[in-house]
Image (tube, rainbow, N blue to C red):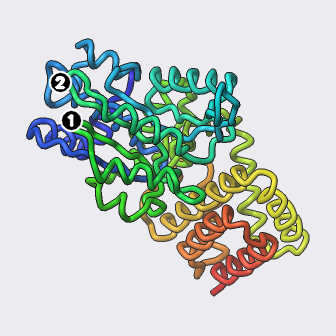
């Protein structure tokens, strides 16, 4: 049974449906919120609703337009997302043309098909670090062409913050479209990082903030994925309302996750010099070789300490119903004056420093020193 994004994000969807009912549809919207909160799914469903032939509150899913939008194959739909840098090739006559390689095109086609099957699927093409200027130029060519008067042209721009990578050519090209919007067209920018978008782009979009998914939705999703009942609470707690993180977590053996988190907590709360040396060496190397894994490990730590802070303050948390609770109780008992909230913020700062190419041995050593200070204020 597919999960209902309309009820999972009921308040947001009420606002979106009112836009359709009022017939006051804007030319540009910005859907922003934490990773994995269903922004892209909501954008697809909103696009579907704006062209639905029979409904004004939810897409009917049965009319031809809804069916084509759901499959991401509608003639009025254009998808923009990060792609590998295009290569130049010589053509007859002067100049060159840009093209995506055949292998990359196959990956793009496969990714769109997966997205059509599961709107929560995240499109990630290898070596794609930005939205290309070529994508926006091609978009501009098509948007201003005359088309059937019925329906509304929709442009979905996923990972919109990657418009600004490098010298921001794609962002500036998009800005020109927003300054002279085509008739009967709506652009929907979707991003986890609204702060990375140009202020001039932000000013031309109506903002739609989307909160994280609730634990009930994540638990239901885990049940549909046939996760063992005994593991659902733990995985839902570590997911923190992020459907992408939940998808990754179910691909990991549960025993390995428990061993990883418990081992990391022991390592950073112990003042053993050998443990510290191993920690700084291991994670300094990861910062250069596999920053995604480093970020994941620190995120697990941050979630654990946030839950420990809530336990110390007698605030309910889903992880208090898991095997993590005894370890949290021991740490609280051993360090009755500890500031677990401050430790959580220290880990957040460390996560933010990972993509900044700072000197990680120093960052990690300072992190360990500050954690000891917060454990024993």
Q: Is residue 350 above or below residue 201?
A: below
Q: Left or right: 306 with respect to 154?
A: right
- Image quadrant holding the N terminus, namely top left
Q: Position of residue 96 (x, y in %)?
A: 65, 35
User: What number is the disc on residue 184?
Assistant: 1
Q: Nearer the viewer, residue 108 or 191?
A: 108
Residue sitting at the far left: 22
Q: Is residue 105 above or below residue 202?
A: above
- CB-based contact (under 8 Å), mark 1 and mark 2: yes
Q: Earlier in the sequence, mark 1 or mark 2?
A: 2
Please tell me how crowded label 1 is: few (under 14), some (14-19), or many (20+) other residues with Cα within 10 Å. Answer: some
Q: Left or right: 339 with respect to 171?
A: right
* Residue drawn at 63 percent across, 63 percent down: 351
- Image quadrant holding the C terminus, namely bottom right
* Residue drawn at 34 percent across, 43 percent down: 188
Is label 2 in a helix, a strand or a loop?
A: loop
* Residue drawn at 56 percent across, 43 percent down: 245
* Residue drawn at 49 percent across, 53 percent down: 161
User: What number is the disc on residue 87?
Assistant: none
Q: Position of residue 361 (x, y in %)?
A: 81, 72
Q: Nearer the viewer, residue 56 or 170?
A: 170
Q: Position of residue 328 (x, y in %)?
A: 61, 62
Q: CA distance from mark 1 to mark 2?
A: 8 Å
Residue 1: tell me if it is visible. no
Residue 224: tell me if it is visible. yes
Please tell me how crowded label 2 is: few (under 14), some (14-19), or many (20+) other residues with Cα within 10 Å. Answer: few
In this figure, which residue is indicated by the disc labeled 2?
149
Q: Left or right: 211 with respect to 376?
A: left
Q: Position of residue 152 (x, y in %)?
A: 23, 30
Q: Nearer the viewer, residue 239 or 377?
A: 239
């Amino acid at each position: 049974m597919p999960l209902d994004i309309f009820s999972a994000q009921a308040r947001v969807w009420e606002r979106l449906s009112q836009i359709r009912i009022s017939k006051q549809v804007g030319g540009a919207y910005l859907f922003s919120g934490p990773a994995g909160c269903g922004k892209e799914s909501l954008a697809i469903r909103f696009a579907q609703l704006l062209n639905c032939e029979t409904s004004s509150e939810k897409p009917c899913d049965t009319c031809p337009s809804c069916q084509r939008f759901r499959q991401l194959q509608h003639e009025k739909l254009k998808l923009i997302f990060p792609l590998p840098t295009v290569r130049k090739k010589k053509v007859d006559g002067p100049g060159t043309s840009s093209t995506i390689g055949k292998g990359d095109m196959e990956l793009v086609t496969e990714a769109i098909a997966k997205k059509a099957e599961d709107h929560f699927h995240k499109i990630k093409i290898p070596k794609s670090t930005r939205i290309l200027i070529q994508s926006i130029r091609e978009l501009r060519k098509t948007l201003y062409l005359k088309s059937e008067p019925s329906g509304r042209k929709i442009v979905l721009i996923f990972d919109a913050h990657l418009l600004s990578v490098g010298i921001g050519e794609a962002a500036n090209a998009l800005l020109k479209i927003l300054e002279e919007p085509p008739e009967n067209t709506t652009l929907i920018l979707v991003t986890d990082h609204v702060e990375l978008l140009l202020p001039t782009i932000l000013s031309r979009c109506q903002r739609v903030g989307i909160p994280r998914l609730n634990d009930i939705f994540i638990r239901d999703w885990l049940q549909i994925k046939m996760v063992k009942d005994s593991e659902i609470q733990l995985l839902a707690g570590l997911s923190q309302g992020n459907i992408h993180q939940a998808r990754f977590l179910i691909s990991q053996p549960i025993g390995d996750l428990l061993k990883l988190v418990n081992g990391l907590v022991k390592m950073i709360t112990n003042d053993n010099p050998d443990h510290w040396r191993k920690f700084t060496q291991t994670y300094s190397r990861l910062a250069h070789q596999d920053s995604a894994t480093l970020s994941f490990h620190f995120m697990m730590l941050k979630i654990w300490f946030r839950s420990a802070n809530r336990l110390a303050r007698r605030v309910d948390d889903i992880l208090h119903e898991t095997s993590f609770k005894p370890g949290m109780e021991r740490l609280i008992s051993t360090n009755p004056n500890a500031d677990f909230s401050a430790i959580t913020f220290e880990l957040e700062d460390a996560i933010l420093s990972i993509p900044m190419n700072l000197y990680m041995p120093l960052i990690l050593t300072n992190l360990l020193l500050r954690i000891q200070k917060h454990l024993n204020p």
